[in-house]
Amino acid sequence: MRWTVGKVTITKIVEMETVGSTRFILPQATNSEIQKLPWLIPHLATEEGRLRMSVHSLVVETPTRRIVVDTCIGNDKSGRAVPTWNHLDNPYLADMTAAGYAPESIDTVLCTHLHVDHVGWNTRLVGGRWVPTFANARYVFGKTEYDYWAAHSDRAEHKALFDDSIRPVVEAGQVDLVASDATLGDEITLIPTPGHSPGHMSVLIASEGESALLTGDVAHHPCQMAHLDWSSNFDSDPVQSIGTRQELFSRFADTPTLVIGGHFNGGRIKRDGAAFRFEV
């Protein structure tokens, strides 16, 4: 899937797609509750009320840069809390190359946050060692985000992830730590959106009077636009994440801005009473 925003192209590279089996992320999103939101069906949920989600990267091509936003789960990883995310063997790099973006052509990797399903393809396994997947790229992490996870990198639940997907690119000298509101070139501005993680960032793209917002995991699914209080089980600060959703969605509701989630397709946010809905 590909979108055009002025002179910028956004291409979705899918690692995996899921239907249902998402209650471990959003326990409030029962089938019956989702069926009460008919605007989700059929593109964002099934008739039975099962959520449609994906794990994907977004390649943002500007007139001067090729940026991969978030890098999914990755092949050959182990120690993941979700059993089916261990030892993957997916054609992610081949799919990216087929879309016109060979790994060596990428000059920037931007991680909205450093959770397991957003950093995995930072590295790949070569000769028993984890090496940067994108050899010619600078890896951009939010400083607040990186500092938090670096301070907790020895905890059992974080160690494998940090050791195989974050530390190798740091040791390779390819990482730039930036403020959560940094500007990356003429078209890209970061927006601080903490709550899901301490230094979570969203990405605002502007070109020739058009705009797009890459939300990351401010919301895992558009059902959280209707239920702002449905915080993910993986939010580091569930209360803060509610406030972030309210603020971000209010800012972009009823505007022409294309909104693409970290786990859902592009559309527009519309006000719907005291909350919001999503139109694809």
Image (cartoon, grey):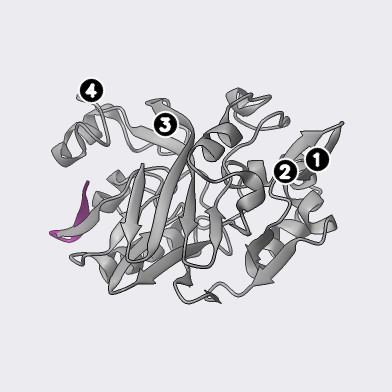
Q: Which residue is mark 1?
A: 130
Residue 59 image point, x, y percent: 49, 51
The nearer-to-camera label among 3 and 4 is: 4
**Residue under circle 3?**
23
Quarter of the figure that contains the N terminus = top left
* Cα separation between marks 3 and 4: 14 Å
Badge count: 4
Neighbourhood count class around disc 4 (C-alpha, 10 Å): few under 14, some 14–19, many 20 upward: few
Mark 1 touches mark 4? (CB < 8 Å):
no
For the residues bearing labels 3 and 4, Cβ distance under 8 angstroms = no
Q: Residue at x 68, y 47 (%)?
A: 122
Circle 1 packing at 10 Å, graded few (<14), some (14-19), many (20+), is some
Q: Secondary structure at mark 1?
A: strand
Please name which of the two marks, 4 or 2, marks the residue nearer to the observer.
2
Kind of residue at disc 2: Thr
Q: Amino acid at mark 4?
A: Glu
Front residue of this view, candidates 249 and 89: 89
Helix, strand or loop for disc 4: loop
Provide the residue span drawn in magenta.
Answer: 272-280
Residue under circle 4?
A: 48
Q: Where does the image place residue 247, in percent across and percent down from the top left?
A: 34, 69
Side of 176 where 185 appears, left or right:
left
Distance from the alpha carbon under mark 3 to that under mark 2: 29 Å
Of badges 1 and 4, the one in the foreground is 1
Q: For residue 242, which quarter of the picture?
A: bottom left
Q: What secondary structure predominates along the stretch shown in magenta?
A: strand
> Which amino acid, mark 3?
Arg
Q: Which mark is first along the chain, 2 or 4?
A: 4
User: Is tag 2's residue or tag 1's residue first in the polypeptide sequence?
Assistant: 2
The residue carrying mark 2 is: 123
